[in-house]
Amino acid sequence: MQPNISLPSLAPDVQRKVLRGAVILGSLTLGYFVGKRIFEKYRARKTAMLVDQSPEVRQAMSLRSGMNPSGVAWLMWGDGTKEDAILQVAQQIQDLDAVAIAYRNLYGNELIKDLQSELSAKDFNDFLQSISSNSNNSGKNSSGSYSAPQRLIVALQTVYVRTSPDASYHGRIYEVGENKNIFKTARAGEFIGYATGKQHYDAKNGVPFIEVAYKKDGVSNVLWISASSNYTEQFSSKVALLAKYPQNSSALSSMLPLSLLGWMGLAGNRMVTKEHAQVYNESFKPTEVIPSGMLVGYPVMTLTGGAHAYTLVRTANGKDRWIETQSLTQQ
């Protein structure tokens, strides 16, 4: 026969205390989530009220619409992504940091993280490259624009200079035999080279890179370095650089910008007209017709509209212009 075992019951006063504690805890928890929800709605409503005055808010909303077409937040992961719409918005963005703040206020998420999860590595790079081509972003080292052509790059702390934009290899003993793309280790305050204007986001390792180039002792070098402001500093002139890092005087004398319109002298980086071509400005208004065989700049991005495709090219001095893709060839 099984013994009849009963658990001792709590005293009435203890039961009241436990019940009162549970009620208080439940009320506090409910109050927290209700308050948080009210605050989030207030913040989103206040941000949305700025739509007519703030292009950054409109751009943030347009980007969200491209990533979450249905408008149902919990469906975002499987909602499909309108890459073309996102890239079109990128062409309008002048201040990505302000757009990211508006996006955070509206949706409570980080814009860059959402874009990385919704876009392929190529599309995400195209997004950043498109933003960097916008006039107000030229030379601005933000989360959208890594660098501008001909900026002088200096290491802020010890950093690897690489032959490819891949941060996987770190020179450790156990990595022997792997892809050794480390060209050298730059010391803090060391001049590294001249930015070409090309950039790449290493999605695997989460590292933004900028391309740098220079010619020394007759040898041309094209390399990659982290674009993080923790590792590199950028200058618009030698005078500004030497004012802060005078020890680079000899390096600047021996490390020269590449000839033939700077770094565009290297094969594979130049766009040349193969026929007479109409040139359009940033607003797509025709400006001039240029002859065949003319070096026009380096490619930034391509835009397809209807039956025509256009390539945005940038000159060595940072001027942007659109040319019909079929009129160009890359050398």
Image (cartoon, rainbow, N blue to C red):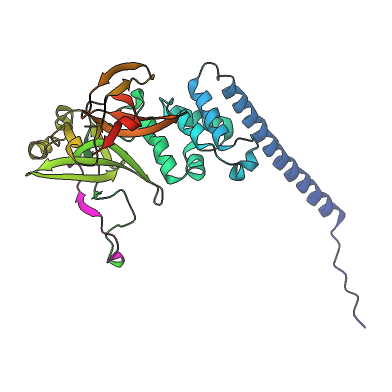
Q: Residue at 62% of width from left, 31% of height from top? A: 40
Provide residue 195's location: percent of width, then percent of height: 23, 36
Q: Residue furthest front?
A: 275
Direction from residue 153 to residue 64 in the image, left or right: right
Q: In this orientation, does residue 105 appear? A: yes
Residue drawn 26% across the image and 26% down it: 318
Residue 228's quadrant in the figure? top left
Q: Which residues are magenta?
A: 175-191
The location of residue 24, given as percent across then percent down, is: 75, 43
State which quadrant residue 82 falls in: top right
Q: On the picture, is 134 further left or further right than 152?
A: right
Q: Is residue 192 left or right of residue 203?
A: left
| Residue for point 15% across, 30% down | 238
Q: Residue 151's x, y, as percent?
A: 23, 32
* Residue 177 in magenta stretch: yes
Whether 9 is among the magenta residues is no
- Residue 228 in view: no
| 138 up-or-down from 165: above or below | above
Residue lying furthest bottom in this view? 1
Q: Quadrant of the N terminus?
A: bottom right
The quadrant of the image that shows the C terminus is: top left
Q: Position of residue 31 (x, y in %)?
A: 71, 37
